[in-house]
Amino acid sequence: MSLPAEKPQAPPVADASMALLAPMHDIECAVDFIIGTGRLKVRDCLRLERQSIVALEQSGGADLELRVHGVPLAVGEVVIMDDVTALRLTRITTPAGMDL
């Protein structure tokens, strides 16, 4: 018989940080899932039409990037649950300029 796994306890610093942010918990944030990026010259943009194919810098099957208000925060893989498309986070990233 195996016992249910216990949830890891958050360190006290994390609890204090969460308490400080409590007034902001209900603020909505813009979230973007970035499939890929690329570059086009203006002449190529002007030639775009329905069924055009635009090459991306990322390879097929690469993780998608999660950005909150334009700031990269995580990467993950696409999952389909019922009729909903979602992102399963595989790695949390540190925003540029932050030491965590």
Image (cartoon, rainbow, N blue to C red):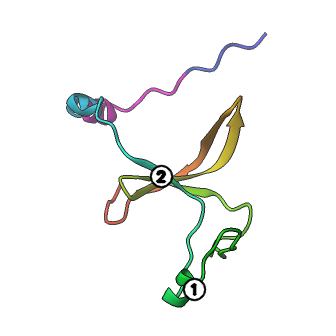
Residue located beneath label 2 in the image? 32
- What is the three-letter code of the residue carrying label 1? Asp
Give me the residue at 68% from left, 73% from top.
Answer: 52
Q: Earlier in the sequence, mark 1 or mark 2?
A: 2
Residue located beneath label 1 in the image? 44
Please state if 2 lies on the left or on the right of 9 as rendered: right
Please state if 1 lies on the left or on the right of 66 as rendered: right
Q: Position of residue 84 (x, y in %)?
A: 64, 34
Mark 1: give few (<14), some (14-19) or many (20+) Cα within 10 Å: few
- Quadrant of the frame with the C terminus: bottom left
Q: Nearer the viewer, residue 19 or 36?
A: 36
Decide whether residue 55 is among the magenta residues.
Answer: no
Q: Secondary structure at mark 2?
A: strand
Q: Which residues are magenta?
A: 7-17
Tell me if residue 55 comes above or below residue 10 in the rendering: below
Decide whether residue 9 is among the magenta residues.
Answer: yes
